Amino acid sequence: MTDFEDRLRAAMNASVASRQPPPGLAEVVRRRRRRHNTWVAVISAAVVLAAAAAIPPARSAMLGRGAGSANSLPAAGPGSFGHGQNYSCSAQTLGALGPDWRQGAAHAGPVWMISNGVAAGFRFARPDGTLSAVPLIVLVRDNTTAWVTPQVPGGQSFRFLPGFNTTNKYTLRDGAINATFTSCSPNTALFGSGLTEYYIGVIVTGPGCIPIDVRTSATGTPVRANLRLGRCASGK
Amino acid sequence: MSFEEFVQASSARLFRTALLLNGNDQAAAEDLLQLSLERAYRHWTRVCRSGEPERYVRGILANAANDRWRRAARHRERALDDDYAGLVSADHATGVAERDFLMRALAELPPRQRTVLVLRYFNDLPEAEIAAILGCSMGTVKSQVSRGLARLRELTEPGGEVASGSARRRLRQ
């Protein structure tokens, strides 16, 4: 070891000897890891959504259908769902429903939406501007991708939530205008009877009957259902 | 050993290594250490199984330092000259001034040379282990050490072969 190497070693040790790492390092690392996982989940969801949007047009093209043919998806359909909420098979739930559940459901094509009803005193919006979640049970025929667009009346807003929080306080920014339901295969669907069940939350700025348009890759043209959340404008 | 216990026991040593790898830049060192610990945390069971978690994390640290330097090209090699005019103006012969000057010179080395010198002289690792960490041959490590030391000498010693401008002249004064 030369004198220069000794001096270098001593200089290195002396220059950092009193330096300490920031406190709470383990927690910082954990937070960083959680953030990383969130990003991975977001990017994965975006990739799945992009793939879901790309497959139907590609399939149509392979089958020799033109973009403007009757069976192709409309321009305002799946392709415009870049910012929608995606509910995939992994989000399915298994909740028991009564045998006559179809009677109270808003039905459009392969999708059924069931609201448990909104209590008379239910506050859709609070004075501080936050909104309460309204739970919905959605059933989608297996092996289906359904693009769901609420046709919200003027002055109303409606959003699909990615999940429920513990405070039940949301803003419109927490949800998405549209939703895509990608149901499971019959082998993986827990609900059975050829259906996949989702338990989701939506937020809406006030009571009303919301027309919901449902498109699928199979039909292309939208089918409409009327989802009743509280009292409708007509007073029904 | 839990991740918390490891951080408690080893973070000071690892942080000091990160500081030297980053030219004493506190923010960059913290970021590098967090990144390395996060990578270790991801595979903590495997890291623990290695039996020497600190050695494992130090390896991540050294390689991450090289990666990030390579990607960002934040530091480019440049001669020590008038940037260091204030460094040795008061008492050029003092050990403090020389130490500071050495550390600044170290920070100016290419990342790979700096990493090798830090692992060799701060962490006291044998050349074979440095080669294993960096995934290169022992000959490469030896040559990097040799070149790194030579460059530091050039920059800091009055008798060096290559002049480094006004800073060295000031050291001579």
Image (tube, coloured by chain):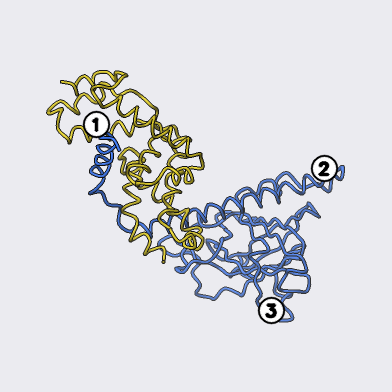
Chain colours: A blue, B yellow
Q: Which residue is situated farthest in the right direction here?
A: A64
Q: Which residue is situated farthest in the left direction here?
A: B90
Upstream in sequence: badge 3 or badge 2: 2
Q: Secondary structure at mark 2?
A: helix
Q: Residues within 10 Å of mark 3 (few under 14, many from 20)?
A: few
Which image quadrant is residue B146 in?
A: top left
Q: Amino acid at mark 1?
A: Phe
User: In this figure, which residue is indicated by the disc labeled 1?
Assistant: B101
Q: Is residue B147 left or right of residue A117?
A: left
A163 to B157, vertically: above or below: below
User: In this figure, which residue is indicated by the disc labeled 3?
Assistant: A97
Q: Amino acid at mark 2?
A: Ala
In percent of the image, x 31 and y 40: which residue is there? B25
Q: Nearer the viewer, residue A156 or B85?
A: B85
Q: Nearest to the eye among marks 3 and 2: give it.
A: 2
| Rendered location of residue A71, percent (x, y) | 83, 48
Q: Chain of mark 2?
A: A
Q: Residues within 10 Å of mark 1 (few under 14, many from 20)?
A: many
Asked whether the residues under the numbered discs 3 and 2 touch, taking CB atoms below 8 Å apart as contact, a structural biologist would say no
Asked whether the residues under the numbered discs 1 and 2 touch, taking CB atoms below 8 Å apart as contact, a structural biologist would say no
